[in-house]
Amino acid sequence: MRLYYYTAKQWGMKSLWEKRLKIAEYADLNDPFELLPFMQTDSDFRSSIEMVVKVLSSGHGVLCFSESWQSTLMWAHYGDKHKGMCLGFEIEDGPSLKKIEYVPERIPSTIDFSKPPGGVDEFMLNKCLYVKHSGWKYEKERRLHVRLQDKRDGIHYNPFNNGMELREVIIGARSSLSIVDVAEAIGKQPDADVEIRTVRAAHSTFSMCTNRELPRQTITGSNPAMEKKG
């Protein structure tokens, strides 16, 4: 499955040079309702939720991707006002990769405290991890749930070859980056073929599209098996 990671120029280039992405910890995400989709008017339920959040946040983080590279809002909010870039990854569908469910209202707390431990079950855990308010629907988000690993200077990273393969680098419409800059950061022999291109505002829709008047380049990968899988 092809998924996209929007980022600013400096962080995107850092990721390409180092062949890894920063793993986000739940406490650092930009939604104050992260892991909290349920109504919390009941004090006992709030105590249970606090325990759930602590468990879910311990030892695990998340990589957040979008299903689309064409969103003007995503470019504006996460791609540094179209001056950044978007990295396209091939990611295998599996239990660690989930689509976010968007809801208009918080979910009623239906916890059964007679069930151990503390009434927490798989339904509740999945809702905490993968439900957000519908105001975030434009993100078309899919999340890769990963272990916090490879910690350097207080930051956890996930290597490109750990469950995801870099396949595209899309340069923002207002970016100062060139194809040459990006190709140098990728290197001469990535694991799989990587296409580099630039986007522009579409002429007929409110979305971004490939700028075919500018150069494009594909860097040939070193592992043919990855090409077949993609």
Image (spheres, helix red, strand yellow):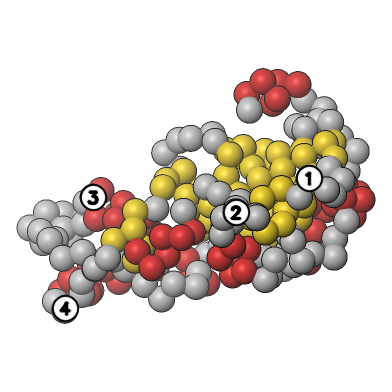
The image quarter containing residue 203 is bottom right
The residue at which mark 3 appears reads as: 123
Tell me how far mark 3 sits from mark 2, CA to CA.
43 Å
Query: Above or below — where is 161 with respect to 55?
Result: above
Left or right of 156? Residue 179 is right
Q: Decide which of tag 3 and tag 4 comes sooner along the chain.
A: 4
The residue at which mark 1 appears reads as: 212
Picture coordinates of residue 180 (x, y %)? 92, 50
Query: Above or below — where is 128 with respect to 145?
Result: below
Q: Residues within 10 Å of mark 2 (few under 14, many from 20)?
A: few
Picture coordinates of residue 111 (x, y %)? 14, 61
Secondary element at tag 3: helix
The image quarter containing residue 108 is bottom left
The residue at which mark 2 appears reads as: 204
The residue at which mark 4 appears reads as: 41
Picture coordinates of residue 126 (x, y %)? 31, 51
Q: Do the residues labelled 3 and 4 touch (CB within 8 Å)?
A: no
Tell me how far mark 2 sits from mark 1, CA to CA.
15 Å
> Which numbered disc, 2 or 4, marks the residue closer to the eye?
2
Q: Decide which of tag 3 and tag 1 comes sooner along the chain.
A: 3
Left or right of 189? Residue 207 is left
Q: Decide which of tag 1 and tag 4 comes sooner along the chain.
A: 4
Nearest the eye: 53 or 82: 82
Q: How many circles with numbers are drawn on the protein?
A: 4
Secondary element at tag 1: loop
Nearest the eye: 93 or 161: 93
> Which numbered disc, 3 or 1, marks the residue closer to the eye?
1
> Which numbered disc, 3 or 2, marks the residue closer to the eye?
2
Q: Decide which of tag 3 and tag 2 comes sooner along the chain.
A: 3
For badge 4, the amino acid type reads Thr
Residue at the (24%, 55%) spot, across then down: 124
